[in-house]
Image (cartoon, rainbow, N blue to C red):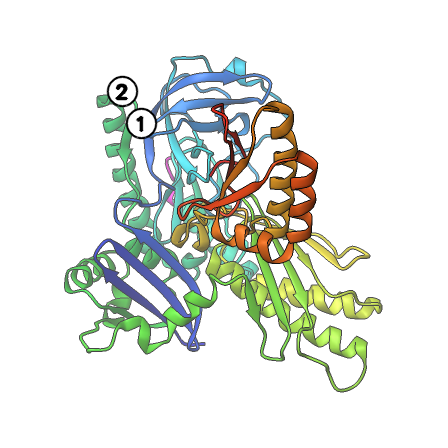
Amino acid sequence: MAAEILINVRPGLTRVAYVEEGSLNDLKIERRGFPTLVGSIYRGRVVRVLPGMQAAFVDIGLDRAAFLYVADVRTDIDGEPRLYLDQDEERDEGDNSEKDEGQKVSIQDLLREGQMLMVQVAKDPLGTKGARITTHISLAGRHVVYMPTIKHLGISRRIEEELERERLRKIVEALKPKGGVIIRTACEGASSEDLGADLDYLYRLWSEIDKSYEKKKSPGLIHAEIDVELRALRDMLNEKVQKVIVDDPKVHKKVLNFINQFMPKHSKAVTLHTGPQPLFDLYELDLEISRSLDRKIWLKSGGYIVIDEAEALVVIDVNTGRFVGKKDLEDTILKTNLEAVKEIAHQLRIRNAGGIIIIDFIDMEKIVHREKVMNQLQLELASDNAKTTVVSMSELGLVEMTRKRTRPSLVSSLCEPCTYCEGKGYIKRKSTMAQEIFMALEREVLRNKSATSAVVHCHSTVADWIYEEEQEALESIEAKIQRPVVFKVEPHYHVEQFEIESSVIGTPSTGPAK
C-alpha cells in the first residue's frame, strides 16, 4: 500500500503524520521547548535508594528526579560507562532494558547515594511521575540499534523470513560489533555495506557521548535525541513511502541532508509543499486529530466506542448505538465488535495510548464469534510499531492488553484538565449543592446560637435552583433553625463553593473551596 510522510512545521510546533492509503496511520507531535526526552542520555547522581521498592531516584538535572528500577541497572555497574555483559536472548527492537531472570540482585547492592551514573531516558515524565531511566544505553541507527554496554545480537521479530534473518545475522557477526546489536525491521534487504556504515556512525557517536560523560561533572544532559522530524524518518521511512512532504524550507533542507546521508535511495521522494492550502488540510488530518481527542468515537455502522484515559490505564467501551442490524442480535453484535476492533487499533496508534488497556466488547454468546473478534484484534495490532500484549477474552467480554508507552499520549500532549471540574469530568448537581447548604445551615445554628439570620454566599445557578425547586425545603429549614435565610449571589464563585455568614460577627462556615 502506498504511504506518505507529511511534516508540518509551525512556530513552536512540529507534527509528523504517516498516511497510508489516504488514512492517518501514525502521528508524532512535539512542541518546541517540550521535546521528548526518550533516547536522551544524562549524567545522573543517585539521590535516594529505596530497598522496599527495589528502585532508586536519580537526579539528572530535571525538575523531578528520574526513576531507576533494579531491572534497569547493570549488575556489575561501578560508575564507569564501559561495560560488557554476555547475553544470549533476543530482545524487542528498541527495548532499553536487560532482564536476567536467573539472577536476583538487590538495588542496595548495586547503587549507593551520591553515585554517578550514565543513564538513558526510557519513558518521558508522566503526570506526577518522573522520567523512567535505564543504565543500558542503546543508540538507534537506520538499520540497527547499537548497545555499547552489553554483548548481544538480536533480530526484530517483524522480520519473519528465516533465510533473511540468517543472512542478516551472518553479516553482523562478520562485522564483529564492539558491543550489542539489534537488527531493526528497516534492515530487511540491507547490504553488508549498509550495516557497516550504520555501525561506524554509531561507534563514533558513542565515543563522543563517552567523552562528554567524562567531561561533565554535575548531573545533566550529555546527548539529546535528534529532532522529531528526523526521528520519525529514521523510524517510519520504508519501501511503502512514495513521498515525504515538508512545508517549511529550512526543515526541508535539514530533512534532505539527513536522507542523503543515511537513506540516499529515498532522496527523490522528498518534496517541499508551497501551495496556499495548509499541508494537513489537503489530507483532512486536522479533522482526524480533532476526532481522536473526543471521548466518543462513532463507527460507520452507527455504533460507537467510548475511550477514557487515566494516568496508567485506558478503558474502551463498545456500544451498538444506532446500529440495529438486519438479521439477528448475535449478528448485529458481531458486526459492531469487528468494526470496533479496527477503530480501536487505529485510535490506539493515533492517540499513542499505552499502559494497561481494558476493552469492554459487547457480550457474545457464541465462542466462534469471540474467537473471530480476538483474531481480528491480533491482526489489526500486528501493524502497530509499539509492542502490544493481548490476554484472551473473559466470559464478560473483557479483553486485557498492554501497549508499550514511552511518550505522553495525544490527549495529554494537546489537552489539560478542565480548570472548572479539576479533571474529574463532572461537577455536583445543583440539587446536591442545595442539600449541602441546608445541612451546613443546621450545623451553623449549633455553632452560633445567638445569630438572628443567615446569609448564604453561593453561585447564581444554585441560588436560582433553591428558590425555584427547593422552596418548600428552604421554608422547612428556616422553621427548624428559627431564623430567615438570605442568598447573596457571588459571580466569581465556583458552582460547588458556598459560604454561610451569620448576622453576629463570627468565623464563617464554608463549603468546599475552589
The overriding secondary structure of the stretch rendered in magenta is loop
Count numbered badges in the picture: 2
- Name the spot of residue 491 as percent of width and height, x first: 40, 48
Callout 1 amino acid: Gly
Q: Is residue 349 above or below residue 35?
A: below
Q: Residues within 10 Å of mark 1 (few under 14, many from 20)?
A: some
Asked if the residue at tag 1 contacts the one at tag 2, i.e. Cβ–Cβ closer than 8 Å, the answer is yes
Of residues 497 and 50, the one drawn nearer to the viewer in this rendering: 497
Kindly identify which residue carries mark 1. Answer: 61
Horizontally, residue 243 falls left or right of residue 508, namely: left
Q: Is residue 208 above or below residue 475?
A: above
Q: Quadrant of the N terminus?
A: bottom left
Of residues 230 and 301, the one drawn nearer to the viewer in this rendering: 301
Kindly identify which residue carries mark 2. Answer: 218
| Residue in the picture at 44% in, 77% down | 21
Callout 2 amino acid: Ser
| Residue in the picture at 69% in, 66% down | 375
